[in-house]
Image: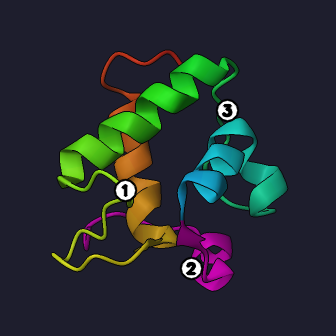
Amino acid sequence: MTSFQYSDALKKSEILWTEETLERWLTDTDKLVPNNDMTFHVERAEERRAIITYLKHDSGKSNQLPAGTGTTGPIHATELEARTTISSMKGTSCN
């Protein structure tokens, strides 16, 4: 997403998102990427699973997270920061 203002910390993280790294991100963004601009967490495990399922469904990939480019590989951290923000605002309560 080109118009999203990504944090410097996330740009430099070079994280490739898998279900495991996304679970860690949703649990505690600052623990995974210190000094990032996303200061939320999803407290309930079932809500984190729902977000991950939504992202997988939205991408059309059943065994991988969305790459956003039509590729089948894992998604880069900055792409997912924007997608996570958007998906977490679609009715999932974040604390």
Whether residue 49 is situated above or below residue 86 in the rendered picture: above
Residue 50's x, y, as percent? 44, 26
Look at the image and give the residue range highlighted in magenta: 1-17
User: Which residue is denoted by mark 2 in the rendering?
Assistant: 11
Question: Foreground residue, 85 or 51?
Answer: 51
User: Which amino acid lies under the numbered mark 2 shown in the image of this protein?
Assistant: Lys
Q: Is residue 95 visible?
A: no
Few, some or many C-alpha atoms within 10 Å of disc 1 (few <14, some 14-19, many ≥20)? few
Is 82 covered by the magenta stretch? no
Residue shown at 26%/67% (left/top)? 1
Few, some or many C-alpha atoms within 10 Å of disc 3 (few <14, some 14-19, many ≥20)? some
Whether residue 81 is situated above or below residue 74 in the rendered picture: above
User: Which amino acid lies under the numbered mark 1 shown in the image of this protein?
Assistant: Asn
Question: Foreground residue, 15 or 8?
Answer: 15
Question: Foreground residue, 74 or 89?
Answer: 74
Q: Which residue lies furthest to the front in this view?
A: 63
Residue 17's x, y, as percent? 53, 65
Q: Is residue 68 visible?
A: yes
Is 4 covered by the magenta stretch? yes
Labels 3 and 1: the sequence-earlier one: 3
Whether residue 4 is situated above or below residue 23 in the rendered picture: below
Q: Is residue 16 left or right of residue 84?
A: right
Residue 33's label in the rendered image is: none
Residue 41's label in the rendered image is: 3
Residue shown at 78%/52% (left/top)? 30
Residue 57's x, y, as percent? 24, 42
Residue 31's x, y, as percent? 84, 53
